[in-house]
Amino acid sequence: MPKAPKVFGSSARPTREQRRGSKQARGYGGQWERISRLKREACPVCEVCHDAPATEVDHITPFRGVGDPLRLSWSNLQSICQPCHQKKTRAQQVGR
């Protein structure tokens, strides 16, 4: 008969943040928060559906690390509502 694992609980598995890295490590720290707020103030309506308040800011072309100039490039950002952002993210994950 199989034996139960010796270790139980959350300490046995890394948390979601530990697996993904902190928001700062992924490029979403203070600089990103500031430019995201400014973009939503400048474009308060979703730039995809044009029918909902923009609650998030999306990278049109995904950036490749903190040093990538696309990360904070205004022309690579769009104000977007959460449903449109989720739809875009799902489509990108399927297309990988």
Image (spheres, rainbow, N blue to C red):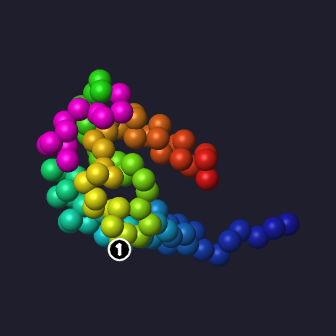
The magenta segment: 39-49
Query: Which residue occupies the extreme right position in the image?
Result: 1
- In this picture, residue 44 sits left or right of residue 15: left
Q: Residue at x 27, y 61 (%)?
A: 72
Residues 56 and 72: in front is 72
Q: Where is residue 93 drawn, in percent x and y?
A: 56, 49
Q: Which residue is under mark 1? A: 67
Q: Where is residue 87 drawn, in percent x and y?
A: 47, 37
Q: Is residue 94 above or below residue 65?
A: above
Q: Amino acid at mark 1?
A: Gly
Query: Which residue occupies the extreme front position in the image?
Result: 75
Residues 2 and 15: in front is 15
Q: Residue at x 35, y 38 (%)?
A: 82
Name the element at disc 1. Answer: loop
42 is within the stretch colored magenta? yes
Q: Residues within 10 Å of mark 1 (few under 14, many from 20)?
A: few
Q: Where is residue 65 drawn, in percent x and y?
A: 41, 70
Taken as a whole, is the magenta stretch helix, strand or loop?
loop
